[in-house]
Amino acid sequence: MAKKSDIVFVREKDAPLLAPPLLESGAFGWFRQNILSTMNDFSSVGGAVRSLIMAAATLFIFYYSVNILWALIDFTLIEAVWSNPQGLKRELCTTALAGGVQHDGWHGACWPLIFAKIKFLTYGAYPFEELWRVNLAGVILIAGLVALMFERMPYRIHIGLFMLVIYPFLAFALLYGLGDWAGLPFVYTYDWGGILVTLVVALTGIVVSLPLGIALALGRQSKMPVIRGFCTIFIEFWRGIPLITVLFMASVALPLFLPKGVNIDNLLRALIGVTLFASAYMAEVIRGGLQAIDKGQYEAGTALGLNYWKNMRLIILPQALTYVIPGIVNTFIGLFKDTTLVAIIGLFDLLGAAQAAVNDASWSTPVQAITLYIYVALFYFICCLIMSRYSMRLERKLAKTND
Amino acid sequence: MVRKTKKTPQKTMKVSDELLISMHNVSKWFGSFQALREINLNVYKGERIIICGPSGSGKSTLIRCLNALEHHQAGEIKVLGNVLDNNIRHVETIRRDVGMVFQDFNLFPHLSILENCILAPIWVKKMPRAEAVDLAMSLLERVKIPEQASKFPGQISGGQKQRVAIARALCMNPQVMLFDEPTASLDPEMVSEVLDAMVELAESGMTMICVTHEMGFARKVANRVIFMDEKGQIVEQNEPNAFFDNPKSERTRQFLSKVLTH
């Protein structure tokens, strides 16, 4: 029989509001919860063994992480050669034993090599006196992108429209040229190279694959069998073959099918291949977002009298795209790095240009390749990091408005 | 004088002679399952019709056929003088003038409450934005939540969401309002605020067709109650007092005995 005090209860005073226990908060709390928690169980033999193994493994991993990090810092910053006052080449980054100026056992990055090759790594063989055109296009691009990242920027919509609609033509006119009459002589794409080619391929792929991917995703969900079938086959075809095969087909096999005398630019072929390839992936990412939208959203829009396109544009796509921002950016980053594959069909993108610089005998040293590849890796890492951080900011911003 | 008749909605069968909706022998199948069996129903301007029945009886399907969210396969439906057929233009004209409120609110989560309301007037009716905002604010005031206008659907309660959904539908100035179990997903504490908004709407003379199990509400505002059974057919319809106090069919009596006991 329960006591009366257990059955009847009326609260007269609020229960006290307490601060969290000390052990759970602060730096010590964090350390306790995340590091110590896996290795402080000594209540049984099994627990003790596991705790000791965890402690040993933690120390081991920590030691090697620090070691590797230190080796990298040592190579790229401390031991590295930064200046080249005498204008040396090979001798600058070789040890005295091998005929260079560095002390024996020296091992560090040879940054003057990058400085010497920077023009080639950035522009390829683009003619020197026309470089201002590339620089101008690049400055406008960076200014536009930075302006678009700021929410409060005045005329943001106008800037966006300019970047999407006018800039591609402007960039084409600047980079490829319009002919001598305009003061912009043609610079053919086999002279393009380095970061220029990487950015042209990646940005075209990114900008075109998103709308194309949306169209394909909507098409794949269409009620009309012909459209649905076409989109499905298109997506499965491009997803089903490796990008290298696409590029090989575009550069080697495609000319066989074209009539004699018709010649499509090598870069253009790579652009089309990369873009279609990326759109197929993009379509599937966006289709995932479309499927996450509750059917009630379609119905609510429909019941309000919105037609299919308005329903998609105003209600479904804004939500679907928000859901799949991580997937979209993932595809962008993948595409950005996949552009290195165009080196295979003879285009000198950044990696291709770096490889050509690796083979330059006048700079032949043991650290030549490492230095160049670190530079290339750093470039890709920074670009991908910017994309990923921006997407995280975008997600946080949209999460605030959504529930 | 008009005010007086509005206070207590008339409980006569026919409110006006103006026929807004007519369903003639309407049938609907999901695969081989027949969801609606030869439905015949006329709705006159100003009527407040409550449809009730056990789950799976096709109540929701019936009202979803009226704005072509579901397509009927036999019979004829005429809404506001337009025949509902495969002609998308007819369908869109009808949808513009028929408001709908859903069980799960279906507010647009990426838009603020105000933007939810002004979306359709701006994009479907091409109303200037300022005018749409004024209209939306007056309707949000009518459902008593103007202070929530700048919030997002995720930040307000279920009862508030459903009132926003009502205001959103009213922004299109519909001639008929369809309610598909508007209180079924609400916490008990919030049912009354939504029903209050619906009673107010009924008193203003809006033509309403409402699927609900709120029998108190039905008695209060309906001028006609329709009961459907599991076979997807209309079993009984009558004015509310006669329907609740003296049901004619055995199936209706069974149903009412289950929903009215508590």
Image (cartoon, coloured by chain):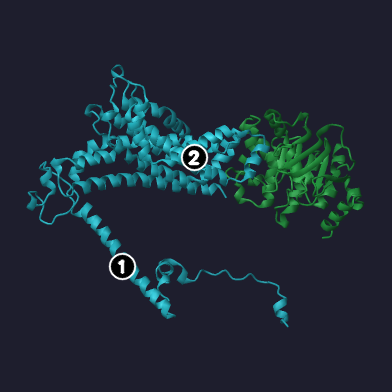
Chain colours: A cyan, B green
Vertical arrangement, residue A220 with respect to residue B163, above or below: above
Residue situated in front as seen by the camera: A183 or B233: B233
Mark nearest the camera among 2 and 1 is 2
Residue at 74% in and 32% down: B84
Q: Chain of mark 2?
A: A
Badge 2 or badge 1: first in the primary sequence: 1
Estimate the x, y position of residue A76 in percent, counting from the top left. Answer: 22, 52
Q: Indicate the quadrant containing the N terminus of chain B: top left, top right, bottom left or bottom right.
A: top right
Residue situated in front as seen by the camera: A249 or A159: A249
Residue A283: which disc?
2
Farthest residue to the top: give it: A181
Quadrant of the rendered structure where residue B90 is? top right
Q: Secondary structure at mark 2?
A: helix
Q: Which residue is mark 1?
A: A60
Q: Indicate the quadrant containing the C terminus of chain B: top left, top right, bottom left or bottom right.
A: bottom right
Farthest residue to the front: give it: A256
Q: Chain of mark 1?
A: A
B96 lies left or right of B18: left
